[in-house]
Image (cartoon, rainbow, N blue to C red):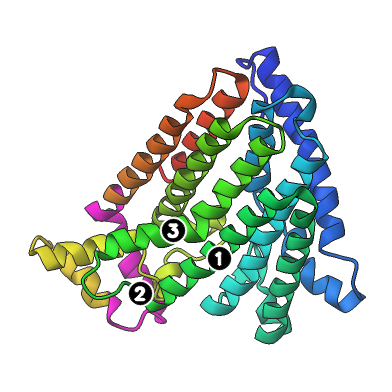
């Protein structure tokens, strides 16, 4: 949103990014359709439900770090759309695995069409993302394939849990880097790459994206506990209800193992072992956990990852685009303030 304190150059960048997003939306609409009507309803379901489009925004901003005439060029729009399609495809699969009843304020795909069709819809969108990326050359194809591999490995590792002897907190952070950081990194990398920014800048924004992706997910861990449904679009404690060990729970269990867990923490773990399908029990856990120090520890971790992301930008020359990336990083963690 444009404010009175913005410079003319900052306003111009914002307006250009907004225009670029319109181009992404148009290509995205084409990419989720072009089948028979019943299939289109399924593959368009999450795209038309909205979403923040954070990854395309990041691609567009990073494209302004290269040659001015290549900013928001057709290859940048194509790459940004390919990344968003990959993200949408992963959501179809995630919702099946998590048995999620809703997504983005609407019923999830598997609730309407069933698990099999939802999985196939995700596969179809992955294929269409790959079709877009295939037009961008070998480097982009290989980077996208590696990103897709990391998405799958992150999801698989989450389902298996940490191997014996590995620190669960470190393991969880790597899962977040693979499941979320990798695709955010790809968005930033492709924006810079296809604007001709050069390998040093492309690598710097790739590292920025990886770190900010982890910060984003840590902020989400806080929001799941502290934010009302009208803000997040889901019931507080949804991750707890689905049995997901997010960072606050991992920190509680770490304190238990270290012998430093307080009485409230012990009460939370006891309640977690009970019936969370009972709304009163879930609400009690959310209230207790929201007051516990592990939530502030998780906020602090999110800030650390955001600071690491900003530090990765040291290699970039000063510009409105660099300032926009710093603001992007701050926004990702301010959500959990």
Residue 277: give x, y in percent of width and height: 42, 81
Residue corresponding to mark 3: 176
Instruction: Indicate the quadrant containing the C terminus: top left, top right, bottom left or bottom right.
Output: top left
The residue sitting at 47% across, 74% down in the picture is 156
Q: CA distance from mark 2 to mark 3?
A: 13 Å
Seen in the picture, residue 252 relative to 27 is either above or below; the reply is: below
Residue 117: give x, y in percent of width and height: 73, 82
Dot 2 or dot 1: first in sequence order is 1
Label 2: how many Cα within 10 Å (few below 14, some 14–19, many 20+) = some
As for residue 273 lying within the magenta part, the answer is: yes
**Quadrant in which residue 94 is drawn:** bottom right
Residue corresponding to mark 1: 149
Residue 306 in view, yes or no: yes
Dot 1 or dot 3: first in sequence order is 1
**Quadrant in which residue 99 is drawn:** bottom right
Residue 287 in view, yes or no: no
For the stretch drawn in magenta, the main secondary structure is helix
Tell whether label 3 touches label 1 (CB within 8 Å): no
- Describe the element under mark 3 as helix, strand or loop: helix
Residue 57: give x, y in percent of width and height: 66, 40
Is 276 left or right of 69, judged from the image as shown?
left
Label 1: how many Cα within 10 Å (few below 14, some 14–19, many 20+) = some
Q: CA distance from mark 2 to mark 1?
A: 18 Å
Magenta residues span 272-296
Residue corresponding to mark 2: 161
């Amino acid at each position: 949103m444009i404010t009175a304190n913005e410079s003319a150059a900052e306003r111009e960048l914002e307006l250009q990014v907004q225009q670029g997003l319109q181009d992404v939306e148009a290509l995205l609409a084409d990419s989720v359709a072009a089948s028979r009507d019943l299939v289109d309803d399924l593959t368009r379901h999450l795209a038309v439900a909205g979403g923040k489009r954070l990854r395309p925004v990041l691609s567009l901003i990073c494209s302004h770090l290269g040659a001015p005439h290549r900013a928001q060029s057709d290859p940048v729009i194509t790459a940004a759309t390919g990344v968003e399609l990959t993200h949408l495809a992963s959501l179809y699969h995630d919702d099946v695995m998590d048995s999620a009843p809703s997504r983005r304020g609407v019923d999830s795909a598997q609730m309407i069409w069933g698990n099999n069709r939802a999985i196939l819809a995700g596969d179809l969108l992955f294929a269409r993302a790959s079709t877009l990326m295939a037009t961008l050359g070998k480097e982009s194809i290989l980077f996208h394939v590696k990103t897709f591999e990391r998405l799958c490995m992150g999801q698989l590792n989450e389902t298996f849990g940490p191997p014996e002897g590995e620190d669960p907190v470190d393991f969880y952070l790597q899962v977040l880097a693979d499941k979320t950081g990798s695709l955010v990194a790809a968005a930033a990398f492709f924006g810079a790459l296809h604007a001709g920014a050069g390998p040093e800048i492309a690598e710097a924004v790739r590292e920025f994206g990886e770190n900010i992706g982890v910060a984003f997910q840590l902020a989400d861990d806080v929001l799941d506990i502290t934010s009302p449904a009208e803000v997040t679009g889901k019931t507080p404690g949804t991750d707890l209800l689905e049995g997901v060990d997010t960072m606050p729970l991992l920190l509680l269990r770490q304190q238990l193992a270290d012998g430093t867990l307080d009485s409230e923490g012990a009460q939370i773990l006891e309640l977690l072992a009970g019936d969370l399908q009972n709304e009163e029990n879930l609400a009690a856990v959310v209230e207790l956990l929201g007051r516990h120090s592990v939530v502030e520890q998780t906020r602090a971790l999110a800030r650390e990852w955001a600071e690491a992301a900003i530090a990765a930008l040291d290699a970039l020359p000063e510009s409105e685009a660099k300032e926009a990336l710093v603001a992007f990083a701050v926004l990702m963690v301010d959500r959990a303030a």
